Structure formats: structure tokens, C-alpha cells
Image: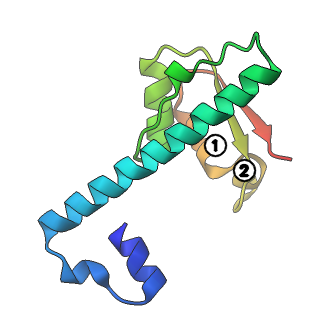
């Protein structure tokens, strides 16, 4: 996070903070972001369940992790014994990634769990 803030301000903030404080700041920032995402997902889940009452969505099954998205998605799907990964995609670079998206492409290649990819509209 410090590197991100440094980029935004044009000042290398991280060089003014020792390693221990930098790690603590980043850890707190990640936890704050995870809590914010968790709350957004909870609210979205409630909205989905209002519109589709029989949807098997469960607020208690919302999982928010930090790390490499491909590795985290694959690890979570396999350890949670999920039977399907559903992903949205928009793609940015080479032909495969234009069609699938780099994260979706990586998950498809690494996952033992089937992956359904839906284009964002």
C-alpha cells in the first residue's frame, strides 16, 4: 500500500518508514480492504437473495483472501471442495487474454475444478 500511495503522491513514502512499520501498515491496509470487500459482498448477496430466493448463495460462504488471484481462486475452490468456478472477464492483451482475461485464463489452466467464464456486458 505504501508503494501505491507513493506513486499517487510522487513521493517515495516507503523509504521513510522502517521495514517493521511498513509491514504492519501493509497488513492493516490489507485487512481493511478485505473487510470492505466482505461487507460489499454481504450487501450484494442480500440483494441477490431478494431477487432470487432459491439461489444457493450464502453470506456465510463469502471468502475474501489476499494474494495472487489465480493461485487464491484455485486453492480456495479445491480446498473448499467447490464443484464449479464462475468468473467474469473482459480481457486486455494477447489473443487468448483478449477472449478470456489473464486471470480467467490462468485459473482455467491451473484448476482441477471446472471453470465457467462469462463475458461482462
User: Which numbered disc, 2 or 1, marks the residue that appears first in the sequence?
Assistant: 2
Give whichever of 64, 73 is nearer the camera. Answer: 64
Secondary structure under tag 1 reads: helix
- Quadrant occupied by the N terminus: bottom left
Apparent side of residue 90 relative to residue 80 in the rendered image (left or right): right
Whole-percent x, y for residue 107 in the image: 57, 37
Quarter of the image holding residue 29?
Answer: bottom left
Apparent side of residue 115 relative to residue 74 in the rendered image (left or right): right
Apparent side of residue 88 relative to residue 58 in the rendered image (left or right): right
Residue, far right: 121
Residue 5 lies, with reference to residue 113, above or below; the image says: below
Q: Is residue 59 visible?
A: yes
Apparent side of residue 16 relative to residue 2 in the rendered image (left or right): left
Q: CA distance from mark 2 to mark 1?
A: 7 Å
Residue 96 has which mark? 2
Secondary structure under tag 2 reads: helix
Looking at the image, do the residues carrying marks 2 and 1 touch, with CB atoms under 8 Å apart?
yes
Determine crowd level at label 2: few under 14, some 14-19, many 20+ residues with C-alpha closer than 10 A: few
Give whichever of 64, 112 is nearer the camera. Answer: 64
Residue 105 has which mark? 1
Whole-percent x, y for residue 113 in the image: 57, 21
Amino acid at each position: 500500500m505504501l508503494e501505491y500511495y507513493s506513486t499517487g503522491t510522487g513521493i517515495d513514502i516507503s523509504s521513510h518508514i522502517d521495514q517493521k512499520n511498513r509491514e504492519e501498515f501493509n497488513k492493516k491496509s490489507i485487512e481493511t480492504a478485505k473487510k470492505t470487500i466482505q461487507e460489499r459482498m454481504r450487501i450484494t448477496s442480500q440483494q441477490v437473495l431478494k431477487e432470487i430466493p432459491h439461489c444457493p448463495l450464502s453470506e456465510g460462504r463469502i471468502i475474501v483472501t489476499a494474494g495472487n488471484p489465480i493461485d487464491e481462486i484455485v486453492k480456495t475452490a479445491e480446498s473448499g471442495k467447490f464443484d464449479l468456478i464462475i468468473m467474469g472477464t473482459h480481457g486486455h492483451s494477447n489473443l487468448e487474454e483478449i477472449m478470456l482475461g489473464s486471470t480467467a485464463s490462468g485459473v482455467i489452466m491451473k484448476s482441477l475444478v471446472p471453470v465457467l467464464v462469462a463475458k461482462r456486458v
